[in-house]
């Protein structure tokens, strides 16, 4: 039987990830309709990304996480918005996912750099 996770930090990180992903998806789809998204939504996504970076990513998950972030950032820069019909929604969704995951990647990368500096 798997051990139960303790409540607290891990739940906050997991909920932050889930909330950030859902918000990025919904806001991206809404933004594709030319609705102006309030800047506070962007700040919320950045805050949630920072929380995920601090609380969610373990040492074992660093490399897969950073590789996934690189893939997401590359997809966002691929010019998906030029595709007919689905391009605008896909481009907007990827833009807001990037806003969410970039702060998490920054925190994880800085943690790795600090750990590498300590190891020497």
Image: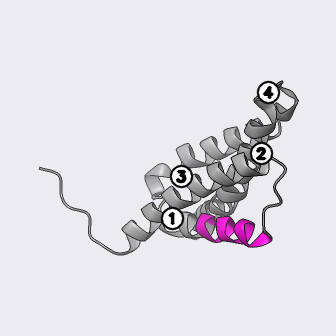
- In depth, the one of 16 and 61 nearer the eye is 16
Q: CA distance from mark 3 to mark 1?
A: 18 Å
The residue carrying mark 2 is 92
* Mark 2 vs 1, N-terminal side: 1
Q: Eyeballing the image, is 32 above or below 11?
A: above
| Badge 1: residue crowd in 10 Å (few <14, some 14–19, many ≥20) | many
* Mark 3 vs 1, N-terminal side: 1
Closest to the camera, between mark 2 and mark 1, is 2
Q: Is residue 109 left or right of residue 8?
A: right
Residue at image location 54% in from the left, 69% down from the top: 54
Mark 3 touches mark 2? (CB < 8 Å): no
Closest to the camera, between mark 1 and mark 4, is 4
The residue carrying mark 1 is 16
Residue at image location 43% in from the left, 70% down from the top: 12
The residue carrying mark 3 is 62
- In depth, the one of 9 and 38 nearer the eye is 38
What label does residue 85 carry, if any?
4
| Badge 3: residue crowd in 10 Å (few <14, some 14–19, many ≥20) | some
* Mark 3 vs 2, N-terminal side: 3
Q: Residue 25: x percent and y percent? A: 63, 48
């Amino acid at each position: 039987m798997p051990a139960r996770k303790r409540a607290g930090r891990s739940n906050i990180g997991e909920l932050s990830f889930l909330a950030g992903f859902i918000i990025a998806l919904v806001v991206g789809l809404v933004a594709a309709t030319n609705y102006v998204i309030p800047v506070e939504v962007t700040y919320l996504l950045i805050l949630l990304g920072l929380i995920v970076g601090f609380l969610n990513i373990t040492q074992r998950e660093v490399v897969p996480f950073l590789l996934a972030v690189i893939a997401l950032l590359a997809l966002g820069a691929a010019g998906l918005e030029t595709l007919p019909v689905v391009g605008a929604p896909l481009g907007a969704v990827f833009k807001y996912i990037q806003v969410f995951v970039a702060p998490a990647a920054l925190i994880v990368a800085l943690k790795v750099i600090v750990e590498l500096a300590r190891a020497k």
